[in-house]
Structures are given as structure tokens and as C-alpha cells.
Image: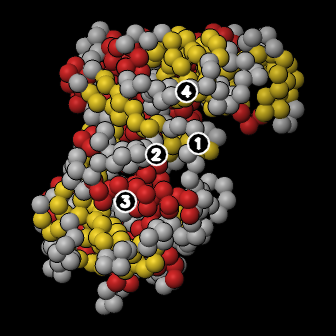
Amino acid sequence: MSKNLFYEESGQFKVAEIVQQNEATYLVNTQHGKRAKIKANHVFLSFDGDAAAFLEHAQALAADMDVDLLWSVCGEAEFSADDAAQEYFGAQPSQSELAATLMALYAAPMYFYKKNKGVFKAAPEDTLKQALAAIERKKQQEAQIEVWAAELMAGRLPEVVAAEAKSILHAPDKQSLSYKAVVKAAESQKTSVFGLMQMVGAVPPLPQYFLDGFLLKQFPKGAGWGAHPQPNIPDLPHADPTIRAFSIDDADTTEIDDALSVRVLPNGHHVIGIHIAAPSLSIEPESPMEALVFARQSTVYYPGGKITMLPEEWIGAFSLDEGGYRPAMSLYAEVDADFHVVATESKLEAVYVDANLRIQNIETAFQPVADTRRNDEFAHQEAMNWLYDFAIAQQKARGKYDPTRPKQFDYGIDLGANDEVHISVRERGAPIDTLVSETMILANSTWAQMLNDAEVPGLFRVQPAGKVRMSTQSEPHIGLGLQHYAWFTSPLRRAADYINQKQLISLILPDVSPRFLPKDSMLFAALRDFEATYGAYADFQRHMEAYWSLVYIQQNQMSELNALLLKDDLVRIEGLPLVGRASGIPIDAQPKSRIKLAVTGVDLNQVSIGLNYLNALLPAAAAPATA
């Protein structure tokens, strides 16, 4: 009769026939007919007879054992498997009963703690109750997951899943029951979580879906402002009563950060006034309002909406709206007949804003390069004509005037009824753009130099080489041809401008200290936070512009598109704020060349477009038509 072993291997109990035995190991034939070595310390007992029948009988006995009864007879002290078998089966348990006891002890780790080979300790009663309660909860949770998953697979949306839909789609708690149910149902249906949620109606229209994801990530506490005190408007001296400032903005601009004015001096020189909204006068360091500025970092823009950095009440108090005196930080630049800036002065004052000019209303009439200029078609046209001449002179002085440069375009997306997409195209660097940008560059560079000369830190825009970056110390900006540059002119909309304005105030008001001192770790943190957040907002804006561009392509049933080849297979579509990748572009195609592409598919869910190369195009002779 064969001699057999009952042993444990990798948490499983097995039997095998002994072939050879030495002090530390056994050479055995396993149930599967393989020759193997078994360590002696893994063996619990030996027996005669049919090994398979022995194991089957032991397994049946173990399955019938009452674990609660076994636990109750084991006591509090450590015990052996032999002790437990004697207490449960009687004074002389059989080999198969001992094997069954071992199986039962190993199978119930919550009831019995393994202390050594064949030695155990019963779990304390309180601990066991907690473990059993946890098991029961897990069973109930698994049952709930099954119920919800079944509903989802049947095309129904459970209330709990509906309530948590945003987080499940964008920022799931992977341990939540609702998420596990969705994943289980999605795997069963062989689809993605998004696909399943869309199938049961839990995904809102795509623009809202994309916005929900952005808000959950960037505004986890919500995009509302909460309760904030009304701003305390400072009592500032009024500017010269002859100054009548005017702003130039898009029609939908509500945060009017900047305005301009022009006066002629008796000596024939002109004085440009660059007037910037001054909310930093009323925002105290470490105040809740400053915390809000540092949390938001910028106004968020996207087609069909925006989320402002400051609450509406604060925007209303400091926006340079027409029809009254508004708090402002003003830079006055005296300019001679040859358009040289001969003197500058910075003031904190209340300036009278005479008009908020809107680009859409005046651009057609503003033709400063025409042979015959009109000065009476809209308010302040004469001043704007002179400012344009000054702007061109500034570009030339910086070595940045290039009338032959390739045309670039800015796009506006307006949404009509039923999300009908209208896309407008403006040439970048149009006369109004040049006028505004050059005057803002003058203010930004002048004030950046003031901070640098006074050794007051700020958030500077620098480009000594390579890409533009931000720094707490000034360095040259080769892209603009300037020694010093920083953002000051949009403090209602950007935290960097607020910080720089706060620093600049300390140079104008001697009794005010800078918000940040040199090498202040908080200023480095502010720089890092601004760059990261500002970049994330820009990515979201581009994402939404790309989405609406694809909708526009579908609405207009566009099967072919003209594009500019950027590099490799990357292309920029003409007439749309859309960049994509195209297949089949010839290997010898040159960057900046124009090509025609076939539209092979549009996926709005993924915001992607399929494009195939058709042929090359001649260089563009004119700007693309307004879409």
C-alpha cells in the first residue's frame, strides 16, 4: 500500500505519493503525475490508502464544519490543529478529520490567526465581530453594485449614478460603489465608461461635458465667488480736467483694464496717457480677495462664456467704464515731433473716461494708412490717428516693423440659435491692434524698468534666448526688442498684472511697502502657480475653439479644407482656430506651404478630425474670407 503526504503549497492543501524521504525534503509523485520535491516543513501528516479519496473526504468534512463552533471551542490561548480537531471531533480524530480541521483553520483567517506551522490563535470576540461586519458590508456592497450594473446594462440610470455623474466622468473615486457599478456594466457591454454613461443619458451636451470636466479640475470648490466685502474705493486726486480718456475693446469686453488719452502741449509735443484700472489699491495683502486672485489667477475665456477672476462688484468698481472718473494708474509719456519719448511720469489718480470704443463699431472707419484721413467719423479718431503713427515709430525703434511679414489671423466664435456657429476672422496686427499693443508695450516696458531700477521684484516676461518665460528678475526680451518687460495692463483679468501693479504702487506711494520682497519664496510660488494655471486656461480655450470649429465644419458640410503646413504632419486649417494632423503629406513638402486636405471624419467626442492630403496650393494672395 502506498504511503502519501498531506501538505500545503502556496495556500492550497494537496496530497502526493512518497517516493523517497530524507531529513529536509520528500521526493513525491503529485496527483498530476509529476515528480516533485516537497519541503518537510510544508507537510502536516502522512497516511495510507487512496490519496485522491483522502483529499476528497477531507474537503467534504471541512465544508461541513461549523466555523463559529470551531472558534468557540478553541479558547483564548494558542492551540495546535490537533487540539482543535480533538475539541471539535472528539478525543481521537482521524487523519482525514485532522486534515479537514487544518483546511477549516486556514480558510477562516478572520477567525483564526496563524502563529506558526500548525499553531493558531482564535481572534478576540470584538475583533471578529468587526471583521464579520465588514464582510457583511462588502457582500451588501457587491450586491448593490450588481443591482446598479444590471440597471445600467438595461439602459436605465440609477439615481445615485446620475447624482455622481460629473465626478464619475471626470474625477472618479475609484473605490465608490457607483463607479464600480459603471465600470462593471461598461466591461460587460464592451464599451468605455464614457460610452456607457452616454448610452444611459448621463452625459450632458458635449460643450457642457467639457466645461464640467474643466470646472471640476480647476474650480473644485465651484466657480462662484462667495461672499466678499464691497471694495473700498480710494479717494484719489482727479487727473487734469482736459484729459478725456477712451478705451478700445471688443464689443463683449466687460473688464475694461486700459484706456488712452492724448494732449497737445504748447511746444507741439504730445502727451500720451496710458490709464490702467487699479484694483490693487483696494486689495489688502493676505485678504480673502487676494486669496481669490491667487486661487483663480486669471479670467477664463471660451466660446460662449467666461469666468472672471474678480467678482462682478469689484469689476464694476474698477473697470474703466465711460461716463465718470475711475481709479487708475496712469503713465504719461511726453513725445516730441519725431515720436521720441522724452519724459515719463507715473501717477495714481482718478481719470475721466469719456468713451468705451468698440472695435466692431469703428474698425471700418479707422483707416490711418489711407492717403486722406478722416478725424470726425467717431469720437477720438484724431487722437487714434496720431497714436497709430506713434505706434509705427515705436515698432521701427524696436526693430520690429515688418510690413512684409506673413499674415496672421485671430478668430472669434459666436454661437447663434441651436448652437449655430459663426466664425469671424480678423487680421492680427490690424491698425487698431497695432495702436493698442504698442501703447501697452510702452507702459509694460517702462514700468518693468522702474521695478528693475529700484531692485523691486516682480513677475517679468523674459526671453534672453529661446522661448519666452517668466522670471522674478528682469532680463531682455529679444522677441519684443526690449531690455525690460512685464505685464501690468490687465490687473482685472490676470494675477501677474495685479502683483506687478502692487509692486509698482510702492514706488509711487512712498509710505506703501512692496507686496513681495526680493527672493520672497511666496513670489516664486506665485510665478509657478500663475504659469501653470494660465496655461491650463489657455489649453481649455483652445480645446473649446477646436470643438466649435469641428461643429462648424459639420454644419457647413465641408469636405475639403485649405491648410498651412506647420511641420511634419501638423497643419493649421485656414479660416478656423483649428490645428490637426493629416495623412499622406509628401515627404518633400515644405513647412509654411499651403495644401488642400480632404475631411475623412469628425469625432466630436474626442475633438479630432481625420484629414488626408490632396494637393499643394499656391501661396495665399489675400486674407481668408470671413467665415
Helix or strand or loop: what does disc 4 sit on? loop
Q: CA distance from mark 3 to mark 4?
A: 30 Å
Marks 1,2: beta carbons within 8 A:
yes
Helix or strand or loop: what does disc 3 sit on? helix
- The amino acid pointed to by label 4 is Ala
- The amino acid pointed to by label 3 is Trp
Residue highlighted by disc 1 = 405
Q: CA distance from mark 3 to mark 1?
A: 23 Å
Pinpoint residue 17: horizontal percent, then vertical percent. 78, 16
> Closer to the observer: label 3 or label 4?
3
Residue highlighted by disc 2 = 429
Pinpoint residue 146: horizontal percent, then vertical percent. 33, 18
Q: Which mark is residue 386?
A: 3
Q: Is residue 580 visible?
A: no
Marks 4,2: beta carbons within 8 A:
no
Marks 3,4: beta carbons within 8 A:
no
Q: CA distance from mark 2 to mark 3?
A: 17 Å
Side of 51 relative to 377 (left or right): right
Q: Which mark is residue 621?
A: 4
Helix or strand or loop: what does disc 2 sit on? loop
The front one of 619 and 209 is 619
The front one of 174 and 428 is 428
The front one of 16 and 183 is 183
Q: Residue at x 81, y 14 (%)?
A: 34
275 is higher (above) or lower (below) than 602: below
Pinpoint residue 417: horizontal percent, then vertical percent. 20, 21
